Image (spheres, helix red, strand yellow):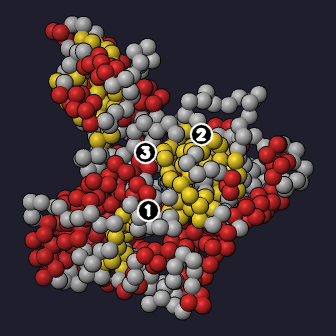
Amino acid sequence: MAVDSAISSPLGPPACEKDAKALRFIEEMTRNADSVQERVLSDILTQNSQTEYLRRVKLNGATDRDSFKSKLPVITYEDLQPEIQRIANGDRTAILSAHPISEFLTSSGTSAGERKLMPTIKEELDRRQLLYSLLMPVMNLYVPGLDKGKGLYFLFVKSETRTPGGLLARPVLTSYYKSEHFKTRPYDPYNVYTSPNEAILCPDSYQSMYTQMLCGLQDRHQVLRVGAVFASGLLRAIRFLQLNWRQLSQDIETGTLNQKVTDPSLRECMGKILKPDPELARFVRHECSKESWEGIITRIWPNTKYLDVIVTGAMAQYIPTLDYYSGGLPKACTMYASSECYFGLNLNPMCKPSEVSYTIMPNMAYFEFLPHDPNSAGFTRDSPPKLVDLVDVEIGKEYELVITTYAGLCRYRVGDILRVTGFHNSAPQFHFVRRKNVLLSIDSDKTDEAELQKAVENASRLLREFNTSVVEYTSYADTKTIPGHYVIYWELLVKDAANSPTDDVLKQCCLAMEESMNSVYRQGRVADNSIGPLEIRVVKNGTFEELMDYAISRGASINQYKVPRCVNFTPIMELLDSRVVSTHFSPALPHWTPERRR
Ligand code: AMP
């Protein structure tokens, strides 16, 4: 029931006092976006005025926008590498931030094959928590009654390492789930999860998934929303159910726990939750043994009102599969965030995926926008870019996001391209267009053209002794399988037909490609099981020429034609697939350990 109109919000009637406060905060921040941004910049520059970085650019204590913009360069991760390396090696002086660096957050964006290390400070956790606290008050405006049940969320921690200087390095969500903010969160009827903390915090992905699924099945009538961070994660959970429902129903029937769950604290916790329920076990067996899994989510969790998963950006490829398994339930994309900084939230979370816009919250960091011109050659020292402030972006235009954070990133290019779709008060709203330079992505992996090229080069070395070379190649992220996998189309030049490479050799080529991929890809293959074995499809000679003919017939210029290194346009896929002469899958897992190679 909505609370009285005295605390009503322009966004809609809040569900409770607490929500009213959160909605008021959103209104205040977005109404005063420019002054909030000015204050944020001034706070950051004051706080960090004595850092090595700001002293080097001779800001001399200035905290205004003009001095900031004229003295600080716009940078990328590579520019910061020396400073980051020093921090990682144990230099505790105030290099980027006046506050001690509490840990590194490992981004899914990579540099030289390894995850980028983002320095963070303790107080950033509060800022992230603040953004999380705004999500349900917004959701409650659209979906009533979420306090009457639970959320089935598949949430996981990933492995962590220490840098040579002893700082922890781990993904931002692992850091959050392991924080007291999450572990000892006060009871909130709108945020009750079926998964106990012990299951979420179990580092073994099988045990974690198994117990989260088991709890979700036990509470099936109470589940009002089903989610994971990304769409790929939710589909992985469905696949897990497909593979494990027999064992799960066995445990439900007897009220005992699968012996493969060995983590002592998890066993103890599950011991208190599990109760024998033969009727539920029968139901699960009945539903899961049906040939069709269409609508399985709503069959098992009939009260689900929406799926809470990100389906924007690279995740849009999973929308049809999610629709199939959920009977077309609404898919809520609630927030937009990164290891560097949490950016903002979707004020209309029940909208269609194609209409999702994120409102950047002006209190999170200082935001600037680099106009994005896909045809420009970039900028040089002589023609520095003109960055636009948050409130000055123009509807319809595309920009690259540039951030200045409390943790000490200054004018840092995130690499995301956003299009302005409108404003909420004076805060702009953005459609996530894409991340720059990403060719292939299945889960959180992001493979660029140079990485793919290197992988093909490394793999094709194995063909030399067969007097064979790769004349052309392209790639495709195949998400019809769960987990999805990379498909690489190869056109080969076999000079000695009597000694052409065997299936075994081509399988080894698949593995060699996987070994060449960045660590996020290899972690997805090895630890998270979120990416399936890489596949090479060898196509008939002349296929890539046909591809060119096709492109030219559709208006491409013959002089400028370049082989696309990634394809997803159906007629092109059909052409390629109709010319496949053999397919080969990686026979083993590539090498991966949590330790960084450098
Ligand atoms: P990471 O640094 O590994 O946490 O990855 C952050 C990146 O994930 C962002 O810079 C975006 O490219 C992408 N991302 C995060 N949230 C969203 C979203 N809601 N929609 C699309 N892409 C997102």
Residue wearing tag 3? 445
Place of residue 288 in the rendered image (x, y in percent of width and height, measured from the top left): 14, 66
Earlier along the polypeptide chain: callout 1 or callout 2? 1
- Residue that mark 1 sits on: 333
Q: Is residue 554 above or below residue 365?
A: above
The amino acid beneath tag 1 is Cys
Image quadrant occupied by the C terminus: top right
Label 2 neighbour load within 10 Å: few <14, some 14-19, many 20+: some
Residue at the spot 18% in from the left edge and 9% down from the top edge? 497
Whether the residue carrying mark 2 lies under 8 Å from ligand 1 is answered with no
Q: Amino acid at mark 2?
A: His
Residue identifier under label 2: 372
183 left or right of 266 in image? right
The image quadrant where one finds the N terminus is bottom left
Q: Depth-wise, is mark 1 or mark 2 nearer the camera?
A: 2
3 or 1: tag closer to the N-terminus:
1
Q: Residue at x 84, y 56 (%)?
A: 63
